[in-house]
């Protein structure tokens, strides 16, 4: 280990250089391109994250790397500089260069800062939306189904295409908080250490049995006792983990009583949307037929209100009939360019009331909803009283 001199040298000597004073610089013996060393420019807030090692670089070899803090994702942009930027290592790794004679002929020593590299540019960080679509793709490879209940634990996770948290943060370009939000948006659940989305048909069977038992046992859908639900559903062959997940997906936990089991209230919109999706799996339907079947499927006490299906269905007029079909915003990419491309392939022109449910979840740091519309759409309005119509730009 090199001995550090008391007066400091290297980078420290430059940092503590007084006004109207100077220091000599020289090429370090290890001077070279050093492609493994890059300059990264960060603001004070990000600097705190870096110094406390709360950041990471994420991405696969074929992807452009991103810089992640706990809550945000940043693109990394290289910017060339016209001025020479000299990189000088910390003082603990350099020694003084001695100069025995000064201009007066007396012995003296001068501090010399040794340059190890000339940096041609710096890396800048630009906040971006998390690249979360890949999460949906990975988890949809192997949805959790009834067959998984009987599958051997000895099957290799890679053969089963399963991913734990560490696998996901290595593959998905998003911060930890954004990843958690993405998992929640997908209604994913951690089972035996791996994150899974549950097969829709399996989730439907759990919900159907829950509603069936609510009728048999005279349970209120506004106050489901968790312990009682678990006991009854376990008898019917449903694992506790999946039953609790069903309550999370379709309900909300009420305030817990210290002396009693916690209670759950089923959410009307989430339950009704589930059954609307089930009805529309068969394809396009006349609106009246759809509403009749949908109404028959939902539990007593809940109302089949068409407005609940914003961002879930599209309607169209064919002659005198109105038809409805499934078109889920959750199935669309989160990338704005890709999203608008699909929307305008679906319909060349959109009225605002139809378009808004399909773009309100788009988030681009530094760009408002109005900015997104200006960038990707062309707005026309024949007269001040008519609804604006949006088409592809």
Image: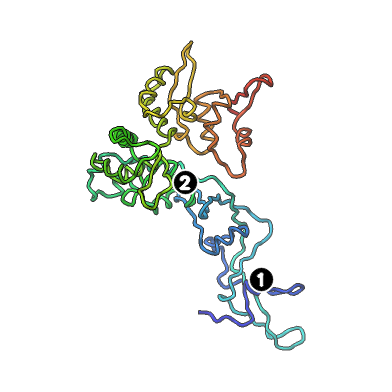
Mark 1 or mark 2, which is nearer to you?
A: 2
Quarter holding residue 282: top left
Q: What is the tally of numbered marks visible in this picture? A: 2
Residue 180 x %, y %: 45, 48
Q: Nearer the viewer, residue 379 or 190?
A: 190
Determine which of the numbered discs, if any, sits on residue 302 in the image: none
Question: Label 2 belongs to which residue?
Answer: 181
Question: Few, some or many C-alpha atoms within 10 Å of disc 2 (few <14, some 14-19, many ≥20)?
Answer: few
Question: Label 1 belongs to which residue?
Answer: 15
- Whole-angstrom CA distance, mark 1 to mark 2, is 42 Å
Q: Nearer the viewer, residue 153 or 146?
A: 146
Visible residue check, residue 32: yes
Q: Secondary structure at mark 2?
A: helix
Residue 105 x %, y %: 75, 88
Quarter holding residue 149: top left
Q: Is residue 53 above or below residue 234?
A: below
Quarter holding residue 393: top right
């Amino acid at each position: 280990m090199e001995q550090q001199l008391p007066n400091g040298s290297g980078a420290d000597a430059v940092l503590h250089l007084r006004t109207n004073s100077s220091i000599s610089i020289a090429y370090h013996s290890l001077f070279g391109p050093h492609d493994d060393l890059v300059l990264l420019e960060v603001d004070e807030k990000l600097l705190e994250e870096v110094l406390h090692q709360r950041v990471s670089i994420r991405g696969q070899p074929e992807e452009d790397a991103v810089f992640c803090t706990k809550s945000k994702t940043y693109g990394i942009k290289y910017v060339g500089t016209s001025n020479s930027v000299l990189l000088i290592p910390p003082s603990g790794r350099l020694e003084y260069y001695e100069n025995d004679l000064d201009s007066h002929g007396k012995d003296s020593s001068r501090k010399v800062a040794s340059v190890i590299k000339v940096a041609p540019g710096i890396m800048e960080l630009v906040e971006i939306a998390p690249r979360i679509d890949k999460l949906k793709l990975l988890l949809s490879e192997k949805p959790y189904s009834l067959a998984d209940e009987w599958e051997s634990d000895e099957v290799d996770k890679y053969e089963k295409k399963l991913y734990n948290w560490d696998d996901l943060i290595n593959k998905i370009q998003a911060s930890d908080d954004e990843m958690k939000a993405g998992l929640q948006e997908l209604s994913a659940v951690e089972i035996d250490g791996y994150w899974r989305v549950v097969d829709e048909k399996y989730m439907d069977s759990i919900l159907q049995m829950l509603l069936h038992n609510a009728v048999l046992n005279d349970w209120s859908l506004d106050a489901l006792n968790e312990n009682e639900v678990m006991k009854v559903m376990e008898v019917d062959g449903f694992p506790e983990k999946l039953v609790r997940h069903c309550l999370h997906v379709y309900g909300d936990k009420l305030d817990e009583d210290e002396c009693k089991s916690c209670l759950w209230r089923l959410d009307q919109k989430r339950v009704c949307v589930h059954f609307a999706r089930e009805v529309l799996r068969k394809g396009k339907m006349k609106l009246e037929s759809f509403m009749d079947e949908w109404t028959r499927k939902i539990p007593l006490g809940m109302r089949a209100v068409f407005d609940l299906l914003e961002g879930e269905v599209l309607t169209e007029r064919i002659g005198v009939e109105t038809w409805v079909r499934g078109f889920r915003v959750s199935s669309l990419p989160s990338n704005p360019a890709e999203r608008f491309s699909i929307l305008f392939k679906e319909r060349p022109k959109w009225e605002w009331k139809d378009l808004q449910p399909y773009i309100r979840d788009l988030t681009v740091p530094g760009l408002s909803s109005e900015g997104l519309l200006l960038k990707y759409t062309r707005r026309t309005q024949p007269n001040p009283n008519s609804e604006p119509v949006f088409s592809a730009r």
